[in-house]
Image: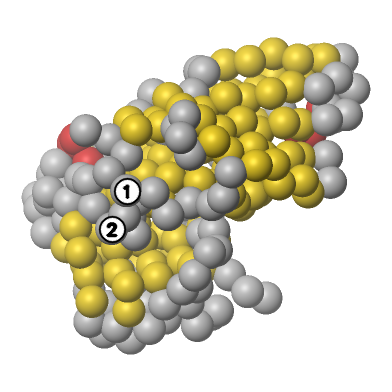
Amino acid sequence: GQNIDQPTEMTATEGAIVQINCTYQTSGFNGLFWYQQHAGEAPTFLSYNVLDGLEEKGRFSSFLSRSKGYSYLLLKELQMKDSASYLCAVRTGGFKTIFGAGTRLFVKA
Amino acid sequence: EAQVTQNPRYLITVTGKKLTVTCSQNMNHEYMSWYRQDPGLGLRQIYYSMNVEVTDKGDVPEGYKVSRKEKRNFPLILESPSPNQTSLYFCASRRTGDYGYTFGSGTRLTVV
């Protein structure tokens, strides 16, 4: 079957760095996406990885290892507004996109 | 403004009464998709469309229908809604290639 696993909740302190992990087992792979979703709002696209390695975008970075079926999202210099759910998603061989259940991040002062 | 527009935002209906949730995008995107989001389960794909008149089932298609007669519109139809279809629904679209989805604001549906 197809499976995407990520921690349910994480807590971090304002100004710190947090890493949200995602492991996946899917039939086919055409890229891994991270989305941010604030409570009551729609998800918004953060990052995309299709090759192994690190992609950096400002305070956010995303890493992919295809051989390990593993990705992480790194958030630096955390701000209160980063409190949200972070969704890991994989585009499979059939061009469907499947999502993990999401990681709810709480940023405390 | 580039966007995906869903209507209605909120809907309460009774079991068995047919309903349609509309979705329209103004970005000329080829791909469109419907997801439902339930606590603890994340986003699950209902149907997706690769282009006009080309649709396919996602992971949870039972009880839903879609159509893609024009590139910009992708309505979701519930012919006979049941309480287990109470959920938060999102429409999304993207361009062909390595792009993430743009999501609509969501439709919170309650079936009583």
Please state which of residues A1 and B49 is positioned toward the viewer in this rendering: A1
Q: Establish if A103 lies above or below B67.
A: above
Q: In the image shown, does B83 or B60 lie closer to the viewer?
A: B60
Residue B22 rendering spot, x and y as whole percentages: 36, 68
Task: Tell me if residue A41 can be seen.
Answer: no
Image mark 2: chain: A
Q: Quadrant of the N terminus of chain B?
A: bottom right
Question: For this view, does B30 lie left or right of residue A20?
Answer: left
Gap in angstroms between the C-alphas marked 1 and 2 = 7 Å
For mark 1, name the chain: A
Crowding at mark 1 (Cα within 10 Å: few <14, some 14-19, many 20+): some
Left or right of B107: which side holds B57?
Answer: left
Of all residues, the one furthest to the bottom in this rendering is B70
Whether tag 1 and tag 2 are in contact, CB under 8 A, the answer is yes
Question: At x 42% / y 54%, what residue is drawn?
Answer: A30
Q: Is residue B19 above or below residue A16?
A: below
Residue annotated with mark 2? A94
Residue A28's mark?
A: 1
Question: Can you give x and y, in whole percent of width and height, for residue A94 in the image?
Answer: 28, 58
Sort mark 2 into few (<14), some (14-19) or many (20+) by Cα contacts within 10 Å: few
In depth, the one of A66 and B11 nearer the eye is: A66
In the rendered structure, the answer to whether residue A87 lies left or right of residue B45 reads right
